Amino acid sequence: ETGVTQTPRHLVMGMTNKKSLKCEQHLGHNAMYWYKQSAKKPLELMFVYSLEERVENNSVPSRFSPECPNSSHLFLHLHTLQPEDSALYLCASSQAGSYEQYFGPGTRLTVT
Amino acid sequence: EDQVTQSPEALRLQEGESSSLNCSYTVSGLRGLFWYRQDPGKGPEFLFTLYSAGEEKEKERLKATLTKKESFLHITAPKPEDSATYLCAVQIYGNNRLAFGKGNQVVVIP
């Protein structure tokens, strides 16, 4: 695998489900990001991890819970989501201190 | 409030018809401006970083320029494979985040 990978690529879940999104980077970076992309809106930064510490939490509801066990892996745990949470969730990585971010292909999430 | 505005929102070009995309920003203390390309169903792909007014970067048919208030992405003699959404983002001093614009959706017709 090369670059940034995300699984699953598509996810449909009910409002009472619990699921997790996974991101893995193979670039030797040490900063990782979660973004939300909704139609007709700019990318919204959700979380930033640098050197495995969370350095940014952009007022994201607690139904989204990130986890960064090491510099190569990032998870987004989801529970009791709302239909308005349906979106493309993108993971990115970079070297800490650099903002040349490299993105994964995203997970298309649909909440029913 | 800091803001990034991209125009036009959508653009249809004939193959070979050169054009420019605009990204204007109102931020205090620009540290860098970034251009990304995003194809449908995929994540953004990094294209360029510009750091100071007057700087230019080129890649194939794309050329990015930067002034104190805006950046342009010039597409010279585009081909259908240049069809994509182009995203502009700025990084501000003292801030961990990139602020993105809504994007320029470009369609190049053969």
Image (cartoon, coloured by chain):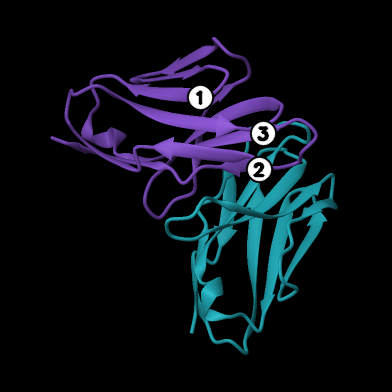
Which is more N-terminal, label 1 or label 2? Answer: 2
Numbered circle sitting on residue B1? 2
Type of amino acid under label 1: Glu
Numbered circle sitting on residue A76? none
Q: CA distance from mark 2 to mark 3?
A: 14 Å
Q: According to the colouring, which chain is cyan?
A: A
Type of amino acid under label 2: Glu
Residue at coordinates 22% horizontally, 35% vertically from top-left?
B80
User: At which x and y percent is residue B86?
Assistant: 41, 38
Q: Say whether marks 2 and 3 touch (CB < 8 Å).
A: no
Residue at coordinates 44% horizontally, 37% vertically from top-left?
B6
Q: Which residue bears the numbered disc 3?
A: B91
Q: Chain of mark 3?
A: B
Rendered image quadrant of residue B28: top right
Q: CA distance from mark 3 to mark 1?
A: 13 Å
Residue at coordinates 75% horizontally, 73% vertically from top-left?
A62
Q: Is residue A80 left or right of residue A31?
A: left
Q: Chain of mark 1?
A: B
